Amino acid sequence: MNAWDRFAATFLDTDVMARYLPDIAAGFATTVWLALLVVLAGLALGLALALLRSLRFRPLSALIVLHVDLFRALPPLVVIVLLYFAMPNAGWSPSGFVATWLALTLVLSAFAEEIFWGGILSVPKGQWEAARSTGLGFLATLTWVVLPQAIRVTIPPLTNRTIAITKGTALGSVVAVSEILASAQTAVSFSFNPSPLTLGAAAYVVLFFPVVLFGRWVETRFAWKR
Amino acid sequence: MQREPPVLSIRGLRKSFGATEVLRGIDLDVRPRELVFVIGPSGSGKSTLLRCCNRLEEPSDGSILFDGTDIRAPGTDINAVRRRIGMVFQSFNLYPHMTALGNVTLALRQVLKKPRREADEIAAAALARVGLADKQGAYPGELSGGQQQRVAIARALALEPKAVLFDEPTSALDPELVGSVLQVMRDLREAGMTMVVVSHEMGFARAAADRVVFMDQGEIVEEGPPAAIFGAPQHARTRAFVDQIVRH
C-alpha cells in the first residue's frame, strides 16, 4: 500500500462516505438554517444599534459601545458555552441551537454595528446639510441620503465578517447542535474512519463558495460612478 | 418696493463656538428680490451668518425672522422653514448615488409629497432652467464642477424658495467653469429671486449686487451699493480689504 492509497483509504473511503452522506446532508441543512438566522438577526441588530447610535444620545451610545466592545472581546465559543451552561442557573435553558444562534448573533451584531457606524460616519457632513437644508428630517435624511451611501462602503467588511461568523456555526458542535462538523464527527466515531470529515469539508466549500461569490457580485453591483 | 416687509430680518445675531465669538451682533434686512453680497476676509463669520439663517448652525443669541416666521421660536417647524430657504454650498454636496434628476426630486417627493410624475416634471423644468435639460440621467461623478453646482442650484430652486443662500458657490470651481454658474445666478436675479451671496467674485458683486455688506471679525463694518463699497469705502478696514482684492 503506497502513501496515496493509505491517504485515500483514510480520508476518501467512498463506502463510508456514501453511508454517512444523509447525516452530513442533514447537518448541512442545519448549518445553512443556523447561518441564515445568525446573519439576518445579527445584521439587523447591528444596523439597528448603529441607527440608535446616530441619534447621538450619550447614555444610549455608551450602552451600545459597551455591548460592542464586550462581544468583540469575547471569543464566540465562550459566549456559546456561557449561554448553554450558565443560563439554566438563571432559569432559562436554551437548546444548543438557540444558544449558538443567540451567541453568534450577539457577536455579529457587535462587529456589524461598528461597520455600519463607520459607514454612517464616512458620509460627509455636507450630505446631511444638503438634505436637511431642503427640509428633509433626520430620519428621511438617514434613509434616503446617508444609509444608501454608508451601506455601499460597508459591504466588503460586512461580507468578510458574515463569512467569518457563519463559519462559527461549527462551534455549535460543542453544545450538541448536529450541524456539519458535529454530524461528521459523529460519523467518524461510528465508522472509525475520518472520511466523513472530508465530506464535511466539501460541504463547507459548497456552502461558502457561493457566499463569497455573492459578496463579490454585491460589491460590483453597489458601486457607483464617482 | 421699500415698503414691502423684508424677506429676512436679522437682529442682534450672535454665535459662539466654545469661547470664540464668531458673530458679534449682526443686524441685517434682506428685502424681496434683493441680491445682497456678503464679503470679508476669511474667518470674518460670513458663512456662519448664512448658516444661521436656516439653522444649520444654531445661533447663540438674537432673532431671525424669515418671511414673517421667527425661526428660533420654540414651536417653529424648522423643516418647513428650510424648504422655503434654498441653500447652495461651496462643495455642491450632491447625492452621489442619485442622478441629477434624483437629486432634485428627492425633497419634492419626500418633503412636499409630490407624486413621482409631477416631481419629475418640476425637476426637469428646474434642470432646464440651469441649462442642464440634457443631463437628467447623469450621476454627479459624470458632471463637471460647474454642472454639479448648477444641479445643486436646481435642487434648491425646485422647492420654489422665497430666498436662496449661496455659500461661496464658485470657490471650488476651476476658473473656466465659474462663468456658467454666475450666469445662472444672473438669470435668477433677472427673475426676481431674493439672494444672499457669500463670495469672492468681486466682478460679479460689482455688476449684479444691489447691496454689498462688508464683514470683519464677526461684525458688519459697512454696507451700501457696490459702487460705494468698492469705489469709496468709508471705513479703514473696508478700504484695506477692497484695496487688497482689487490689487490682487
Image (cartoon, coloured by chain):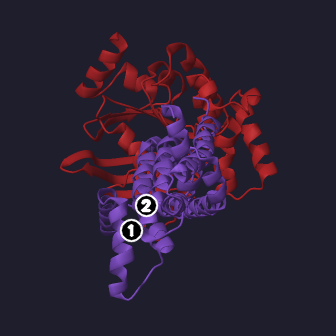
Chain colours: A purple, B red
Which residue is found at the position 55% from the left and 53% from the top?
A196
Foreground mark, 2 or 1, reads 2
From this viewpoint, which residue is outermost toward the top? B247
In the picture as drawn, the residue positioned furthest to the bottom comes out as A91
Q: Do the residues labelled 2 and 1 touch (CB within 8 Å)?
A: yes
Residue B212 vs residue A72, the one in the foreground: A72
- Image quarter (top left, top right, bottom left or bottom right) of the N terminus of chain B: top right
Query: Does residue B74 appear in this view?
Result: no
Foreground: A27 or B134? A27
Task: Say left or right for B72 vs A62.
Answer: right
- From the top left corner, tell me how far across and down residue B224 is, in percent: 41, 33
- Picture residue at 40% right of the left edge, 50% below the top: B52
Chain name for mark 2: A
Q: Where is residue A59 in the image (x, y as percent from the top left)?
A: 30, 69
Quick check: B21 above or below A192? above
Q: What residue type is labelled 1?
A: Ile
Secondary element at image label 1: helix
Q: Read off the residue under disc 2.
A: A171
Residue at the disc numbered 1: A80
